[in-house]
Amino acid sequence: MRLVNAVQAAVPFLSTCIVIVAASGNAMAQAPSAPAKPTDAAAPAVTESQARAREILARMAQFLAKSQRFSVQMHAGYDAVQPSGQKIEFTETRNVTVSRPNRLRVEGSDSDGVKVITVFTGKEMVLIDHGAGVYVTAPQPGGLDDTVKYFVGELGMRLPLAVLLLSSLPQELQARVESIDYVERTSLHGAPAHHLAARTDSVDFQVWVSDGDKPLPQRVVITYRNADGQPQFRAQLTGWNLSPVVDDATFSAAPPQKAQKIAFAAQVARNAPPAVSKPGASKGVTKP
């Protein structure tokens, strides 16, 4: 998301998601845990294949949640549905480094070359948008889980696949996944993996989970079936490192000398008067 000015509306795209993630119309879920649905006595019996798929997904979630440090590269593409109904794909790469209990670094580069850096230092949140020449800081509200939920849910910022960063990932998936199936075993994306397809109340998602003692996600595809045009988010997750070398410098970020400090849009919007639409708005390509 571009921080063009302090009052620009924030559009979380696939931020927490798979619902894995919980963000919406634009993101992979916002993250507060959803209440578990009551058991339906008339629900169909779970097949062996479905039980296997759910067990693999649970192992992946538990493995990631217990990993105290890791880094991964994300190569992603997502659909922007235009007013005409046409879908246009935008792409991005993100280098993600996590150090629990409270630190995160994400270096992103959009398809237009603009770089955005997000850092949770353990004490504050720092976001630098090199394209807009602006940066923003705010106190960090707690550990990594609380900060991710606040960053995405309250501030409306983009953090694709943010739910994968949460230590509560097993509980998030347990609460949200309504059905899941085992599709196939494949080596198409590198090491042998299990291809799973699942549904929540608002999205369909597929995940390819590595076989073996490190059940890491290799690829994620999310379809927002209730959104106009049913846009998708697609990401390849490569270069997993479960013991990256990190220090205080890893989780620090200095804005460029001429960068302007602004406030998070959501913080400004809480105290701003309602926006007034202006006639003659641009009819060019729109991007989340």
Image (cartoon, rainbow, N blue to C red):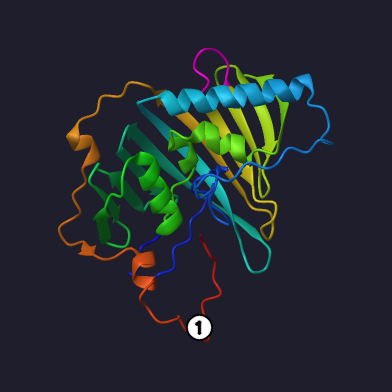
Q: Position of residue 270 (x, y in %)?
A: 38, 72
What segment carries the magenta color? 210-216
User: As shown in the figure, which amino acid type bears the numbered disc 1?
Assistant: Ser
Choose between 197 and 64: the one closer to the eye. Answer: 64
Residue lying furthest left: 257
Residue 62 or residue 80, whichever sits in front:
62
Residue situated in front as seen by the camera: 21 or 91: 21
Residue at the extreme top of the image, as rendered? 212
**Residue in the image at 33% along x and 63% along y:** 264
Residue 214 within the segment the image draws in magenta: yes
Q: Main secondary structure of the magenta part?
A: loop
For the N terminus, the quadrant is bottom left
Where is residue 68 drawn, in percent x and y? 35, 26
The answer to whether residue 83 is above or below residue 192 is below
Which residue occupies 40% across, 46% down? 148
**Residue position marked by numbered label 1 in the rendering:** 277
Which residue sits at x=61%, y=32%?
Answer: 207
Q: Is residue 35 visible?
A: yes
Q: Is residue 195 above or below residue 229?
A: above
Q: Answer few, some or many: residues within 10 Å of disc 1's Cα (few below 14, many 20 plus, some between 14 and 19).
A: few
Q: How many marks?
A: 1
Residue 229 in the figure: left or right of residue 97 = right
Residue 223 as seen in the image, left or right of residue 27: right
Q: Is residue 39 left or right of residue 72?
A: right
Viewer-side residue, 220 vs 90: 220
Q: Secondary structure at mark 1?
A: loop
**Does residue 164 lie above or below 113 as drawn?**
above
On whether residue 153 falls in the magenta region, the answer is no
Mark yes or no: residue 194 visible.
Answer: no
Query: Where residue 285 sits in the image (x, y, percent)?
Result: 55, 66
Q: Horizontal and vertical percent for residue 179?
A: 72, 36
Query: Residue 83's quadrant in the figure?
Result: bottom right
